[in-house]
Image (cartoon, helix red, strand yellow):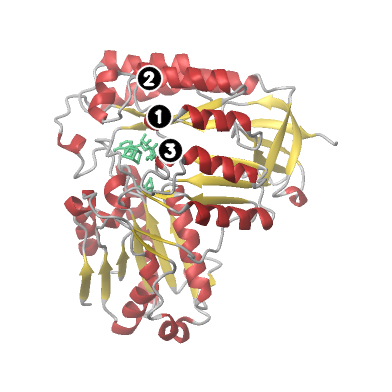
Amino acid sequence: MKTKVINSPDLLKAASRKREATRFDQIHLDKMNELMPLVKGLKYYIKTYGCQANVRDEETMRGMMENIGYFPAENVENADLIIINTCAVRENAEDKVYGEIGNLKYLRKKKKNMVLALCGCMVEEPEILDHVLNTFKEVNLFFGTHEIANLYNLLYQCLTTGERIVAVESKAGEVIEELPVRRNNNYKAFVNIIYGCDKFCTYCIVPYTRGKERSRKFDEVIKECQQLVDAGYQEITLLGQNVNAYGKDLDEGHDFADLMEAVAKLGIPRLRFTTSHPWDFSSKMIDVIAKYPNIMKFIHLPVQSGNDEILRKMGRRYTRQKYLDLVKEMREKIPGLSLSTDIIVGFPNETEEEFLDTVSLVDIVKYEAAFTFIYSPRKGTPAARMVDNVPYEVKSRRFQELVKHLEVNIEKSSKEMVGNIYDILVDGESKNNKEMMSGYTETNKMVHFKGDNSLIGKIVKVRIIESHTYSLIGELVNE
Ligand code: SAH
Ligand code: SF4
Ligand code: F3S
């Protein structure tokens, strides 16, 4: 099969930050009318890996596909279009995707006209793209994170020429409004407020795969949130790789605190945001969180390391003391605040002392949740070029040790909740027990309790009766 490369990724270009973001008010519709009769009644299936940015992209692609006549497939076997939406943040994220392509490629042999597509952050890496192009001949459409709005045109080319189509342009990125959407959930929603990342932490691939920081206009964000409130949604999460940078690239005079306040005033019962970088978390933001009861008292504040030298090498722009001062101000101003974090263990040449600084910081801050990772070199990032003298066994042992420390407080905070009553936004049946329902507290603790399907999407009161490290058992309280 012929491969047609429309454009391919380039990490240097991807890191360029000179160009202004271009703004469009709709997706590219050129080939939509020709495509519709070709796909009417066909079925699509999307498998998403990675962060909420990818989940939200999936919802846009679902909206686009359903607008031209595709139906969601009940299972992957009866899909005519399979899209694998990938993540490149760590090696194990990529390994999962290789496994998935391996599992699905037989389907394309069965169906001649099937499209097996790969999109998301992995295809933005030149070497990975080369590898998949050579290894998985069954994949016949590759498109990058900046190419979603062009999907109708790419699909049309793929279906009519029978060629493999590669469209991964490394560019600063665009802001496109009025994107179609089919949301995965009818009571909880993600709303993008800023795309891309300009922080370039030395270990991280995201700024290369997602382009420059570019904010959506204030009124566009408010419009989307208002629609969600009107539709009865219970929870909105404002989304960005770094939400604190919101508005800095616009000259509208609104920062993230202004935007958060305006959304809180729309009356959504639960407002969350993720992710916020400690570096430009302002006092004004803390004041807004403290002021509005519907802004959840839960902040995900990735620290990565508790040691100044490692933080400097990571390019994180804050010191241990600055981070601790920020936490202190948050705790003073926001009673009942719960904090979670991300930590990387085993950054190149991390010494035992440096690692122990992270352990001691964890003991001081007392996080109620944490994502911990062993450092994974990402080709093209500055950290991947550093010589690393720490053996993997040492990193692995440190990782276990850190998790033990984190769990002490996670367990303690769960135990302290026993006997109290909390508001739970009900998600659905518990994974392991169909008689139980599960949902989240305002501070993001997962609670299981006896209940029925009629409660899904509602906020109910639950008394906690039992605590485990990562979940709680409760009973419904009749008001
Ligand atoms: N923009 C967000 C999320 C970035 S990715 C933020 O800055 O918080 C989520 C987490 O993955 C990061 O916080 C970091 O802890 C981890 N991560 C990123 N690159 C990594 C790498 N190369 N190896 C291991 N963990 C990594
Ligand atoms: Fe990656 Fe740092 Fe940007 Fe987060 S802030 S996405 S860790 S570069
Ligand atoms: Fe992964 Fe891309 Fe998100 S690398 S974490 S899916 S921005």
**Location of residue 98 by image quarter:** bottom left
Q: Earlier in the sequence, mark 3 or mark 1?
A: 3
Q: Could you give the CA–CA distance between mark 3 and mark 1, rounded to whole angstroms?
A: 9 Å
Ligand 2 is located in which of the four quadrants?
top left
Residue furthest to the right: 479
Whole-number angstrom distance, CA of label 3 to CA of label 2: 16 Å
The residue type indicated by label 1 comes to Pro
Give x and y (percent) for residue 343.
Answer: 38, 28
| Mark sitting earlier along the chain (3/2) | 3
- Residue 186 at x, y percent in the picture: 64, 56
The image quarter in which residue 312 lies: top left
Instruction: Say which residue label 1 marks.
Output: 278
The reply to whether callout 3 and callout 1 are in contact (CB within 8 Å) is no
- Check contact, mark 1 vs mark 2: CB within 8 A: yes
- Residue 191 visible here: yes
Residue type of the residue flagged with mark 3: Asn
Q: Report the mark closest to the observer, 3 or 1.
A: 3
Query: In terms of depth relative to the viewer, which is nearer, 432 or 23?
Result: 23
**Residue 392 or residue 117, whichever sits in front:** 117
Evaluate whether residue 470 shows in this view.
no
Mark 2 = which residue? Answer: 322
Q: Is residue 8 above or below residue 328?
A: below
Residue behind mark 3: 244
**Who comes first in sequence, dot 1 or dot 2?**
1
Mark linked to residue 446? none
What is the distance, in whole Å, between disc 1 and disc 2 at their CAs? 9 Å
How packed mark 3 is, by other alpha carbons closer than 10 Å (few <14, some 14-19, many 20 or more), is many
